């Protein structure tokens, strides 16, 4: 597998319509040119709508996709720093699932309304965003779902877990889009056993999926600004993401 050449791009902050018609902030990056292409909704992790997430949005534009990341904390802490907004959201138990789905629906609609859209949209998320990427795939018309070590898609949520979430087992029958899952073999949330449970469920219900677990990698192995960053796993993971979207978001 090889990564496509980099594309010239334009990146900007804008406002989109989210859940219940709310106007929320978002960050978008788009390649130059009028070629038809698929879009990607990037779902930020629990630390929020931060610099590292915006770099990921630009990376997808470099790969030739229109990309957007809705700020899921727009309502909790407008005009706050990512750290402050994440602290407020965490104190409130995280983003409600129904509101999240509405915000991603708005982001997907924004992508599909672009003159360059070929009508196809994928989702991707990391950590809490990995679970949310799967959640979006269970309820929205999307064409590809990427789950990067999303905790509590399956398994039992600990009683002391700070976010008010449940697993998605009862919602997985709604997931029909192809799924790419990238996991660390040394991760605890999700553990290898939880990944195996998800694999078995998707296999039984006939959802196309491709899972990869990396030996020596734990949680957050894509995070370049953390000690958990694993170069080999991240490089291979990015190659697989590019290939997956190249297949399922092609016009």
Image (cartoon, helix red, strand yellow):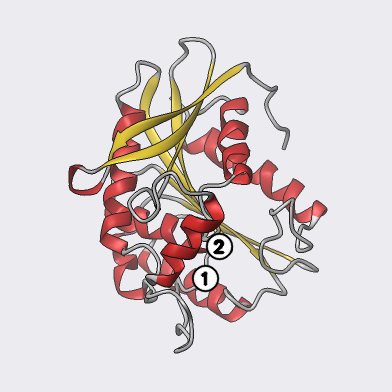
* Percent coordinates x, y for residue 50 in the rendering: 57, 47
- Residue drawn at x 51%, y 57% as measured from the top left: 84
Quadrant placement of the N terminus: top right
How far is mark 2 from mark 1, CA to CA?
A: 6 Å
Left of 142 or right of it: where is 84?
A: right
Asked whether the residues under the numbered discs 2 and 1 touch, taking CB atoms below 8 Å apart as contact, a structural biologist would say: yes
* Percent coordinates x, y for residue 13 in the rendering: 46, 30
Quadrant placement of the C terminus: top left
Secondary structure of residue under mark 2: loop
Rendered image: mark on residue 151? 1
- Residue drawn at x 32%, y 28% as measured from the top left: 112
Crowd rating for badge 2 (residues with CA inside 10 Å; few <14, some 14–19, many 20+): many
Secondary structure of residue under mark 1: loop
Using the rendered view, name the quadrant where residue 238 is placed: top right
Rendered image: mark on residue 201? none
Regarding residue 147, the answer to whether it shows in the image is no
Left of 37 or right of it: where is 137?
A: left
* Percent coordinates x, y for residue 7 in the rendering: 63, 19
Using the rendered view, name the quadrant where residue 62 is placed: top right
Q: Earlier in the sequence, mark 2 or mark 1?
A: 2
Q: Nearer the viewer, residue 133 or 103?
A: 103
Q: Nearer the viewer, residue 25 or 143?
A: 25
Tag count: 2
Regarding residue 138, the answer to whether it shows in the image is yes
* Percent coordinates x, y for residue 206 in the rendering: 39, 61
Q: Nearer the viewer, residue 224 or 168?
A: 224
Q: Which residue is mark 2?
A: 127
């Amino acid at each position: 597998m090889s990564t496509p050449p980099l594309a010239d791009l334009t990146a900007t902050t804008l406002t989109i319509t989210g859940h219940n018609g709310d106007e929320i902030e978002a960050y978008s990056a788009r390649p130059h040119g009028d070629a038809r292409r698929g879009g990607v909704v990037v779902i930020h992790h629990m630390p929020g709508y931060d610099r590292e997430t915006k770099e990921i949005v630009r990376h997808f534009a470099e790969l030739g996709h229109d990309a957007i990341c809705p700020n899921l904390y727009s309502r909790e802490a407008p005009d706050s720093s990512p750290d402050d907004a994440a602290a407020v959201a965490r104190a409130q138990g995280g983003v409600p699932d129904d509101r999240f789905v509405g915000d991603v629906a708005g982001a997907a609609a924004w992508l599909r309304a672009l003159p360059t859209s070929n009508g196809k949209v994928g989702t991707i998320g990391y950590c809490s965003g990995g679970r949310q990427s799967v959640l979006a795939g269970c309820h929205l018309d999307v064409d590809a779902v990427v789950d990067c070590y999303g905790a509590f898609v399956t398994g039992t949520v600990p009683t002391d877990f700070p976010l008010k979430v449940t697993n998605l087992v009862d919602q997985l029958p709604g997931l029909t889009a192809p799924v790419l899952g990238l996991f660390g073999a040394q991760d605890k949330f999700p553990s290898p056993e939880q990944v195996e449970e998800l694999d078995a469920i998707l296999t039984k219900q006939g959802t196309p999926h491709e899972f990869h677990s990396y030996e020596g990698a734990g949680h957050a192995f894509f995070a370049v600004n953390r000690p958990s960053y694993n170069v080999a796993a991240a490089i291979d993971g990015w190659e697989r993401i590019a290939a997956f979207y190249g297949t399922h978001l092609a016009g």
